[in-house]
Amino acid sequence: MTLKLRSAGTSDRGLIRSGNQDALHAGSWLVAVADGMGGMAAGDLASAIAIEAVAPLDVATPEDALVAALQSGIQLATNRIRQAVAEDPQRQGMGTTLTALLFARTGSCLALAHVGDSRAYLFREGVLKQITRDDTFVQMLVDQGLITPDQAGSHPRRAVVTQALQGDEVSPTYATMVPRAGDRWLLCSDGLSNVVRAETLSEVLAGHPDREACTRALIDLALRAGGPDNITVVVADVADEP
């Protein structure tokens, strides 16, 4: 038996925004979420560029090449965003978050790349753990002990990111992990994580075995909480299959 990745993704504009600046990829080897910023057209473009740059990584990749593949995808996204800004100076300041998970062809390893405040959570044996660390001003305050995580959720500057893909050099976080059968991954934009508590996320992930239904249930919760931002959700299960 070999571990396989099975995924589903959904995105919603939310109830306030006039457009959707998020983008996603939900494949057999790669899942990714990007949340664009910097004005409507530019935000749309930046997140689309990021997802288009990493989407070709959705192939069977050797485990020792996972991180290098993600690094090359992020470098390509950075170069393309820089080029897009050069072509139209009005795009100056556009950028996007990117959180991506790449599964090895053997099923024995996965790699995660992260920049910005879109999140990756691992739901394993009934316990939800946030794997990524937000690149945000309020997370810096939390790390310094100046505010609590609960205070961060309502802080007026909670949307200020300290890192994003904007055409400049960045320092993404990379990590590798050993997957287990039964693992469930949740990748999401802050349109979900800012308005739905982790305890509720855990309940929904546990209560909806069908991935498509799970993504819809999570988006519905964010909408019921006011839907102040675009909401993007990818649910990926690690399955033990022949």
Image (cartoon, grey):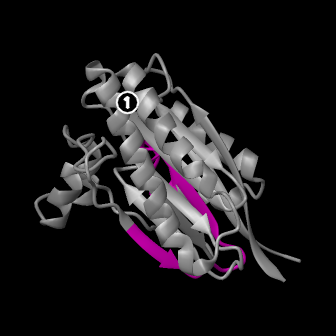
Residue 102 position by quadrant: bottom right
Q: Position of residue 183 (x, y in %)?
A: 65, 72
The reply, left or right, for residue 149 in relation to residue 48 is: left
The relative height of residue 64 versus residue 76 in the rendered view (above or below) is below
Q: What's the residue at 37%, 30% (across, down)?
A: 84
Amino acid type, residue under disc 1 in the picture: Ala
The relative height of residue 15 versus residue 165 in the rendered view (above or below) is above
Q: What's the residue at 27%, 19% (across, down)?
A: 90
The residue positioned farthest toward the right in the image shown: 242
Q: Nearer the viewer, residue 54 or 24?
A: 54
The reply, left or right, for residue 66 in relation to residue 212 is: left
In the image, residue 175 lies in the stretch drawn in magenta: yes
Q: What's the residue at 54%, 71% (across, down)?
A: 66
Q: Position of residue 30 (x, y in %)?
A: 63, 58
In the image, residue 185 lies in the stretch drawn in magenta: yes
Q: Nearer the viewer, residue 11 or 56?
A: 56
According to the picture, the residue beneath numbered tag 1 turns out to be 84
Q: Position of residue 208 (x, y in %)?
A: 72, 54
The residue positioned farthest toward the top in the image shown: 18
| Residue 160 visible somewhere in the drawing | yes
